Amino acid sequence: MRFIPGPIIIPRKSRKEKIERKKKTKPAKKEKKLVYVLIKVKPDQLISEKAREVEEIFKGKTFNRVVNPDGYTLLMNAQNLFSKSSRIYVVELTDEMNCWFYLVPSEERIKFKNKDKYMVFLIKKDSALEEIANKMVEGKLTKKSTFELVLTAIEVALGLLTFVAGYLAFENVIDISQLSNIVAFVFFFIFALQSIKKGYRRRSWED
């Protein structure tokens, strides 16, 4: 009897498996970081001389230099560079009369030996970048707004409330169920405060 082979069945992956595979292979989106560095020029030095020293730090890297910019110009430069790198350095060089800004995209960390201010901004919302750029050119970046100070004070007070509630539960003044309700309220309120904060986080160090 002659053997006739049947059709070869190739199993197909389900749509769910394809979607999961795409999710696994898709690279995670990196958080945008803006590193602000302030360098003040000494009274006996020209800003152009100090600029040459600063540019040596960026040797081998591409950078934009803008002189006495407005907030919009600085914002446009920053947005353009964020399309190329998840981290950009904004170095402000000032002699109190003129401000030269250097914008440098770099995934690698850049070290500065002599600096007067060093701040890292983790950008959560694109709209926050405009506020940061305006504060830079206005010289208000290092100052916390009244809104931020009030929110910080409320968060500290809520933290103290949790500590006091824990102490009262330990002394059997309140029961565990009341403590749980207080802790849940505190966490919910802190989460609500975080959601109305600005679209960025600020700190004084890099990872």
Image: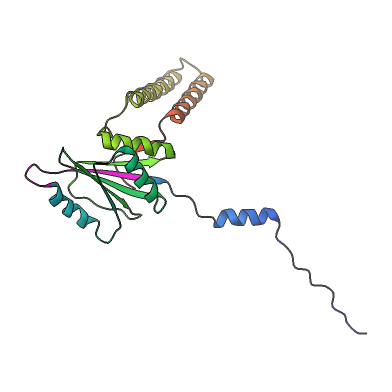
Q: Quadrant of residue 68?
A: top left
Residue drawn at x 74%, y 65% as measured from the top left:
11
- Residue at far right of view: 1
Residue 35 magenta: yes
Q: Position of residue 156 (x, y in %)?
A: 36, 24
- Give left or right: position of 113 versus 11: left
Residue 178 location (% of width, % of height): 51, 18
What is the residue that sits farthest to the top in this orientation?
A: 173
Tell me how many marks there are: 0
Please give left or right for residue 153 compared with residue 6 in the image. Answer: left
What's the magenta region?
A: 34-46
Q: Residue lying furthest left in this view?
A: 44
Q: Farthest residue toward the bottom?
A: 1
Which of 179 and 120 lies nearest the eye of the viewer?
A: 120
- Locate the N terminus and report the quarter of the image it occupies: bottom right
Q: With respect to residue 127, does 58 lie above or below?
A: below
Residue at image location 39% in from the left, 25% down from the top: 155
Of residues 85 and 108, the one nearer the viewer is: 85
* Residue 151 percent coordinates (x, y): 38, 24
Q: Nearer the viewer, residue 194 or 66?
A: 66
Residue 62 x, y percent position in the rendering:
30, 57
Image color mode: rainbow
Image point 84% across, 78% down: which residue?
Answer: 5
The quadrant holding residue 157 is top left
**At 79% from the left edge and 72% from the top edge, which residue is drawn?**
8
Vertical arrangement, residue 183 with respect to residue 89, above or below: above
Q: Is residue 193 magenta?
A: no
Residue 102 left/right relative to 190 = left
